[in-house]
Amino acid sequence: MTVSKTDQIKALLKSIETGDPGPVAVVNEAKYIQHNPQTHEGSEGLAQLFARLSKTNPKVNMVRGFEDGDFVFAHMEYDFPSRKICFEVFRFEDGRAVEHWDNIQQRHGPNKSGHSMVDGPTTVTDHEETETNRSLVRSFAETVLVAGQIEHLADFVDADDYTEHNPHLEDGSSSLQSALSEMTGGNRHIDYHRVHRVLAQGNFVLCVSEGERGGVHSAFYDLFRIANGKIVEHWDTTEAIAPRSEWKNNNGKF
């Protein structure tokens, strides 16, 4: 029986907790490219990372897992030793993982609407709408997030049915609008500069972007759920990008 790419990545990440060395075989050691600036290049860096984490009695849970062609993207809960939320992205080539990106932050919340950073629907539906939903999110990101055309928010977000999982926001598009409009020292507090990648499967779309939060160079990973042609739910992580002098590989965050 063929094991899906998502299940292979689930087993790989779970091995951080279990210590099982078998799932690491999904990684092509000769080609593996690491984009986490805090991790050394190649499979040796991955092995070192897993060995270190395994000593902290870690807990690993894949809340959501998706496939988009050669890519697997997953929404993860980690506890090693502090509680963190992460998005993991792997690229496959010839049946094995050859490239990896991630974005991780401390877990906070619940928010004012009572939502955690990971609760909510997990089932992929509307597979036939994958490309339409990908296009919707890319257009939203480029128009509203990057170009700052907040007045077009209602073109993309369902004003009557929008669920927010960001620990600092709450349900309803008005909370999102306020956050995107907030200014600090004459500049937007949340400032998206560039969209790097948009991954999609059915009604879920992950947008990977670069910008600044509070003046700090940051990576934004935003997961959206789409229904009836509008964004109806949002999860995210924001991670400050370490200075270039602190990187342990030369591949870049994106």
Image (tube, grey):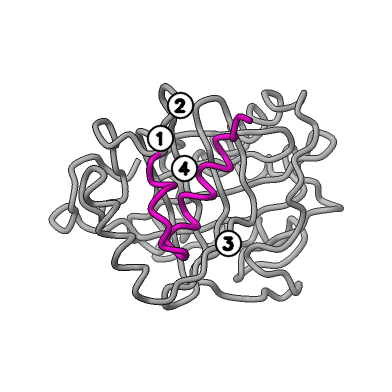
Q: Which amino acid type is shown beneath numbered disc 1?
A: Ala
Distance between the Cα atoms at labels 4 and 2? Answer: 15 Å
Q: Quadrant of the N terminus?
A: top right
Instruction: Determine if the magenta segment contains residue 171.
Output: no
Distance between the Cα atoms at labels 1 and 3? Answer: 20 Å
Q: In terms of secondary structure, where does tag 1 sit?
A: strand
Asked if residue 115 lies left or right of residue 148, the reply is right
Residue ID for mark 1: 97
Residue ID for mark 4: 89
User: Magenta residues, as a range?
Assistant: 1-25
Dividing the picture into quadrants, the one containing residue 176 is bottom right
Residue ID for mark 3: 61
Dividing the picture into quadrants, the one containing residue 110 is bottom right
* Rendering coords of residue 81 (x, y %): 42, 77
Q: Answer with mark 3 or mark 2, whichever residue precedes in sequence.
A: 3
Instruction: Determine if the magenta segment contains residue 15.
Output: yes
Residue ID for mark 2: 95
Q: In terms of secondary structure, where does tag 2 sit?
A: loop
